[in-house]
Amino acid sequence: MPVPANPIVLIPARMASTRLPGKPLADIHGRPMIVHVLDRAREADLGPVVVACAETEIAAAVRDAGGRAVLTTPDHPSGSDRVFEALSLLDPDGRHDVVVNLQGDLPTVDAGLLRRTVAALAGDATSDIATPVVPIGDPDERADPNVVKAVVGFPEGAETAPALYFSRAPVPWGGGDLYHHVGLYAYRRAALERFVGLPPGVLERRERLEQLRALENGLRIVAARVDTVPLGVDTPADLERARALLVRR
């Protein structure tokens, strides 16, 4: 496959959230959370950054901060579907060959993690999708079903390797590292287009993990080993942690 040359970063965002309604506009030091995510993406300097939003109030907050936003259909079943619609609206001629799907609830994500993910895709000609993983250090996370594990066998000295499976269970069996999957993706454009056209997979429904749909249909995912798991904001307690972390910036 050709080396990716022209990425775009798309950030899906919607107001509906069971545990933290209105999450994208949650205040963090006087600025909405979605604007902090936008800032982190801009720091990566990969290409254009656009928020793909379901509601006009998110678009207004992004534009007030000098960012770009595009309104999408409110009832998309996933962020990937929202990202693909935004891509189709923004770039109908197909100029962007890589699409980074950055969740809108990662205000502390490191710009280097975004660059590392895109580099992993560029460095593996057989891959369709790249995603970061982090060795699990906390023993409690190994059995926590909310911590998704990536089954990856890194050869000695390698920092990238094929992702063979994802699970909420502590897999694989035996000694050695388990890897925490970070839900951030860099897609080759054709892979994203194919992915959103596929029906949910058998294992995807069982594990409740969308990325298994790609593996079940023969798409190849390369994992990039990184050092840090960004804080995902899902609850009021997470929001307080994000505020504490970002005050240092």
Image (cartoon, rainbow, N blue to C red):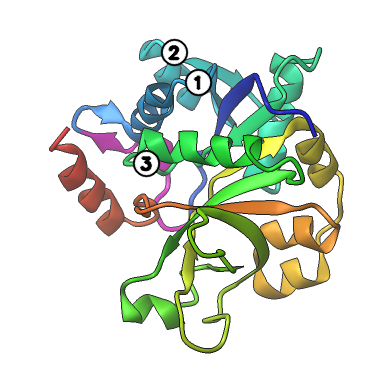
Left or right: 230, with 120 as reference point:
left
Residue 148, image x and y in percent?
52, 68
The image quadrant that residue 42 belongs to is top left
- Answer above or below: position of 190 versus 8: below
What residue is shown at x 48% (from left), y 58% (from top)? 157
Q: Name the N-terminal-most of marks 1 and 3.
A: 1
Q: Which residue is mark 3?
A: 109
| Kind of residue at disc 2 | Arg
Q: Which residue is mark 2?
A: 63
| Kind of residue at disc 3 | Val
Give the alpha-carbon distance from disc 2 to disc 3, as whole Å.
21 Å
Can residue 74 be seen? no
Q: Name the N-terminal-most of marks 2 and 3.
A: 2
Can residue 45 be seen? yes
- Answer above or below: position of 147 versus 33: below
Secondary structure, mark 1, is helix
Q: Which residue is mark 1?
A: 59
Secondary structure, mark 3, is loop
Secondary structure, mark 2, is helix
The image quadrant that residue 30 belongs to is top left
What residue is shown at x 77% (from left), y 28% (from top)? 2
Residue 246, image x and y in percent?
20, 38
The magenta segment: 18-28
